[in-house]
Image: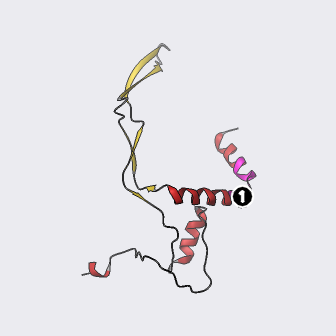
Amino acid sequence: MPFLSNAKHIRASLRPSATKAALAAAHAARSAVEPIRLSARYAPDPVHPRATIELRRIADAQLVPLEFADHRRIETAQSVVLPRACLATADRAEIAALLDRQLIPYQCLTEARRIASIEFVNGPRPCDRR
């Protein structure tokens, strides 16, 4: 069975609620401990700067050792820790659709609450406007 067909078959056999619950639990576990890397790249490994791989030559089917730069090490730059909660006061339908597509759990509040929070406004700050 081709890979894509097999993946679709396996996905169809999973219960959506169980899948969503498992992904929500994994997301909660990751966000509680592990920061999200904003960028990552492969970099040369100082311990193993070169790797030799035997490849088969098409002309005569002989194995030929070829040396390549070894870039298996992953370098990460900035990281951020996910907040315990985010509050959206605008564009709620669009944000809900995005979270649903990513299977990220969320809760819609039906009544006003008073909470301590740090505000983040996406866009220029009032002092930046000229």
Q: Colour scheme in the image? A: secondary structure
Q: Residue at x 60, y 80 (%)?
A: 109
Residue that extends furthest to the left in the rendered view of this protein: 130
Is 15 part of what is drawn in magenta? Answer: yes
Which of the two residues, 51 or 56, is positioned nearer the viewer here?
A: 51
Which of the two residues, 97 or 82, is positioned nearer the viewer here?
A: 82
Tag 1: residue type? Ala
Residue 128, percent from left and from top = 27, 78
* Quarter that holds the N terminus: top right
**How would you classify the magenta stretch by its main secondary structure?**
helix
Residue 124, percent from left and from top = 33, 76
Write down the region rendered in magenta: 10-19
| Left or right, 51 with reference to 56 | left
For numbered disc 1, what is the local secondary structure? Answer: helix
* Quarter that holds the C terminus: bottom left
Q: Residues within 10 Å of mark 1 (few under 14, many from 20)?
A: few
Which of the two residues, 129 or 20, is positioned nearer the viewer here?
A: 20
Residue 31, percent from left and from top = 52, 59
Count of residue discs:
1
| Left or right, 44 with reference to 36 | left
Residue under label 1: 18
Above or below, 29 against 59 in this view is: below
**Quadrant of residue 99 within the rendered picture:** bottom right
Q: Residue at x 59, y 64 (%)?
A: 104
Q: Residue at x 42, y 18 (%)?
A: 65
Q: Residue at x 51, y 56 (%)?
A: 33
Above or below, 71 against 80 in this view is: above
Which of the two residues, 121 or 94, is positioned nearer the viewer here?
A: 121
Is 43 part of what is drawn in magenta? Answer: no
Residue that extends furthest to the bottom in the rendered view of this protein: 112
